[in-house]
Structure formats: structure tokens, C-alpha cells
Image (cartoon, rainbow, N blue to C red):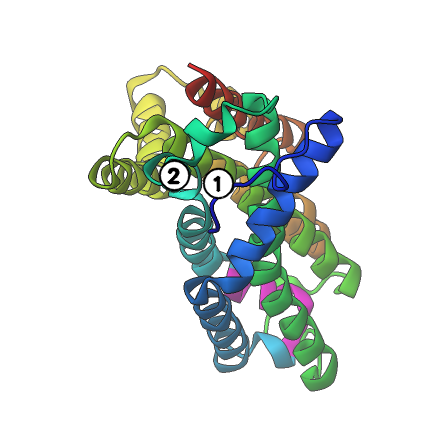
Amino acid sequence: MSTATSTDVPGSTTSDRVRSVFVRELRTVARTRTFLFLGLVLVIAFLGLAWVGGGARAGYVPTIVDLLTPIELLVPIVAIAFGYRAILADGNRGELDVFETYPLEARELVAGIYAGRAIGLLGAVLIPLAYVGALVAVAREDPFGRYASHAGADSPLLFVRFVVVTALFALVVLAVALAISALANTTRSVLALAVVALVAVLVGLDLALIYGLDAGIVSESMLAESLAVSPLSAYRGLVFETIVVTAAGTGPQTATPLASVLGLLVWGVGSLAVAVWAVGR
């Protein structure tokens, strides 16, 4: 990332200042080979899983079922990688001190960084999924021949819905990563926080929900809504409730879509608010 200069952060309007930080982040993403490598890993992983698992030949919904668990693991890892050092790196290079000499507010800095990193992350996640969609369109044989449990309507529109929900999930985890980056003071601490965040997103919150259900804190009647507490559970519930169950035409309620969307939004907006607070303190 280049050091800020007087031309990097113009002081005319809020949109100009956010756009300057945004462009700088896009350049950083484009120059960072690690991000390109992560995107290539996702292309290979998604295409390989779709083909080897047989989903690509069975239809869109079977492909989604094949990809769901790997995506629950890989997307948070990639999202954390894109954002966990974004703000800390500025602090380590003294760029946050430089920014204090400009009329750049904390919310503008966070918005620009988030927008730039989000473009890179969406490219890394959505391009592989687009390849998978194209593979299914070409390789699809009998959409219901391999997966009897998905004998309902199988449509590319359901795959598009899956892509949109996955993009939302990735953006939420990126916001969490930016909050971590803003809160950390050293490289060691940000690594520790990143690991803790990954464990919490991938395992911890789900285990907390299971414990709450077992202890009677969470009632069975409220379980569908309670899944929104965990971003991963909210994402999984949205996929099953709005895509898999929709395709099957019947099945038990796996989540409340409105609660799941609100849960993801709370995690995303709340994390960005924490990042703004930490930068401006």
C-alpha cells in the first residue's frame, strides 16, 4: 500500500474522500498476490467439488448442497484474510497519523477501506461461483436423476439466489475482519483476534446455540429465530429455507428468513460501527 500524499485524500467532499481511500484499496488488492492466490484456490475448490460430488451433472440445487459446507469453511477464511490487517497496516506504517492532517473522518476511512476490500472479496468469491454456474449449465444431465431428495423445481434462479446470499455472508465476515483490524494494536494481537473470530464464526456461536437449547435457555419454538444470532447459522438457514426447501417443495422450517437477514445485517453494520469507533478513538 502506498503512503498517503496530499493527492490521495482530497478534502473537498465526503464522497471524494471516500473515493480516494476506495481507489487506494483497490490498488492494494490488485497488487497483493495473496488475494489472487485465494481466488484461484476457490475456483479450483468450487469447480472440483461440483464435479467430483456429481452436483454439476445433477442440477443447480444438488450443486448448492455439495458446495454449502465447503463454502461455510472457505468463505470466512478468505474474508478474514482480505480484511484482518487492512486498518492495522495503515497504523503500522503511520498512515493513520498522516490521515489526521486531512479532513478525513473515521467513518470515511472505514467506508473507503471496506468498499475497496469488498470489491476484491466479491471478485474472489463470486467469479468462482459464476464458473460453477456455467459448469452446471453445460454438464447438467438429468437434474433429478442423482438426488431424489431434490425432486422439486431446479432452476438457475435458485443458484443466483444462492450467490446473492453467499455474497452477503462474505461481506458480513469482512466487516467483522475490519473491526478486528481496527481493535488490534500489533500484528500478533490481530492474528490472535482473527483466529478467535474464525473459531467463533465457524464453531463457537453454533455450539453456544446448542448449549442454550440443551440448557433450556433457547426454546425449541424459538430455535428458527435464534439461528440469526450466529452469522454462519443465519447463512445456512437462509440457504436451506429459501433455496433447498423451495426446490424440494416441502420440508420442516429450518430458519426464519427475515430474522436471518436481520441477524446478518446487525453483524455487518455493528462490526463496521466498532471499526469506526476504534479508528476514531
Residue 201: which disc?
A: 2
Residue 264 visible to the viewer: no
CB under 8 Å between discs 2 and 1: yes
Which one is nearer the viewer's eye here, 3 or 90?
3
- The image shows residue 158 at horizontal and vertical percentages of 73, 57
Which one is nearer the viewer's eye here, 42 or 65?
42
Name the residue located 44 percent from the left edge and 55 percent from the top edge.
78
Type of amino acid under label 1: Val
Q: Secondary structure at mark 2?
A: helix
Residue 164 appears left or right of 212: right
- The image shows residue 178 at horizontal and vertical percentages of 45, 35
- The image shows residue 100 at horizontal and vertical percentages of 49, 23
Type of amino acid under label 2: Val
- Image quadrant for the C terminus? top left
Eyeballing the image, is 167 above or below 216? below
Name the residue located 60 percent from the left edge and 53 percent from the top edge.
26
Which one is nearer the viewer's eye here, 253 or 33?
33
**Residue named by callout 1:** 173
Using a 10 Å C-alpha cutoff, classify the residue at mark 1 as few (fewer than 14 neighbours), some (14 to 19) or many (20 or more). many
Residues in magenta, as a range: 58-67
Eyeballing the image, is 177 above or below 140? above
Residue 69 appears left or right of 152: left
Q: Indicate whether residue 275 is drawn in magenta.
A: no
Residue 181 visible to the viewer: yes
